[in-house]
Amino acid sequence: DISPSRDMAKLETQSGKSPVWMFWRRRRHLITFLMFLGFANIYMLRVNLNVGIVAMNSSYNVTLSNGTVVEKQDFNWNSKMQGVALSSFFYGYTCTQLLAGWLATRFGGKIVFGLGVFVTALMTLVTPLAANTSFYLLVAVRIIEGVFEGGTYPCAQAIYAQWAPPQERSRITGVTFMGISVGLVVGLQLSGIIGSLFGWSPIFYITGVAGLAWSAVWFYVAKNCPDEDPHISAEELKFIKDSLGDSHNDLKETIKIKHPWGKILTCVPLWALILSNFCINWGHYTILTLLPMFMKDIFDYQLANAGFITSVPYIVMAITMQFAGNLADWLVNKNILSATMVRKVLISGAFLIQAVCLVLVGHLTSVLVVLLCLMIDVGTESFSMTSSL
């Protein structure tokens, strides 16, 4: 029998007895770190317009050559147009979820995930040009970004199906998805600061360049599966393959599997999981997309302050994400609850708390209490996210 604890102890002392913090000596941890940075970049690229659109439609003073101070506004989009610009990303995002999952299985998650970030970064760099040319061209650019980012979540699951041992999966998922929180915090705050100091265009240039830099590292370092990695140790390779079992050893073999689609589509637990993920994403993206505008329109927060305030809930999320992932693993590994029961308890409990918080946000007038409710809401989301895989 394989003892996970003994194998883990062996892995911790491999590569010249490297300390635990030297995560790059263990390739699955390096992949996890790169995925963490990847999701951080994905969300920086995603939220830059959420803050940028506030700057794009804000008035500012300009001093003419004769000393006259006039008020100028680069764009005067009404709330409907701003809503279309912000939501257009999701038109493309919803189109590639299933297709990307198939592509990741067929060609490997490395290429599909990397292209998702790379193309989105390129589109981000041309966003200022598109916005200045035509509103509809901006919408088209955001749709393209959504198309390519739509494959990142399915790719993450395809990659971890090859790299993540079951007893570490919730923890690894927690580390990876903490990149979402970091990307949101950095993206929202950085966009607010840059927009206040230098205008809205540099918001897109800086985040776009960061995405391209990550893409270069990803394509050079990452591999689809442990067997393709020339730098992985024999001990770690054996540990991963033994943990995953024969069904995950050969990526090509999984392509030949004939799926019973009729039974899959009529599976009640599957639809329960689909519904739970729908609820997770509905709340997540609604708050993420509209929170900067909400803070400015309802509480009259200026750009830099709005970027900072809207990032605070995601700082809480980054902290709770780690606790949630470790809690889920601990409950399963200690045989306290089954994996199915962990999903039911954590997801249902998180939904109940989030529902109460969102109802309160719609009726409160104190910005501090609203912020507290949003912190609880977004922080609790970590438990449903890490339990949904």
Image (spheres, grey):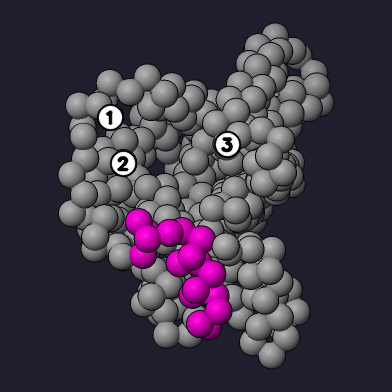
The amino acid beneath tag 3 is Ala
- Dominant secondary structure, magenta: helix
The amino acid beneath tag 1 is Ile
Q: Quadrant of the rendered structure where residue 343 is?
A: top right
Q: CA distance from mark 1 to mark 2?
A: 17 Å
Q: Earlier in the sequence, mark 3 or mark 2?
A: 2
Q: CA distance from mark 3 to mark 1?
A: 20 Å
Residue 286 versus residue 160: which sits nearer the camera?
Answer: 160
Determine whether, in the image, residue 298 is placed left or right of residue 280.
right
Q: Residue at x 66, y 83 (%)?
A: 14
| Helix, strand or loop for disc 1 | helix
Pointer 2 residue: 97
Pointer 1 residue: 264
Residue 246 is one of the magenta-drawn residues: yes
* Extreme residue in the front direction: 1
Residue 9 is one of the magenta-drawn residues: no
Pointer 3 residue: 339
| Helix, strand or loop for disc 2 | helix
Residue 61 versus residue 82: which sits nearer the camera?
Answer: 82
Residues in magenta, as a range: 233-249
Q: Earlier in the sequence, mark 3 or mark 1?
A: 1
Determine whether, in the image, residue 183 is placed left or right of residue 317.
left
Quarter of the image for the N terminus: give it: bottom right
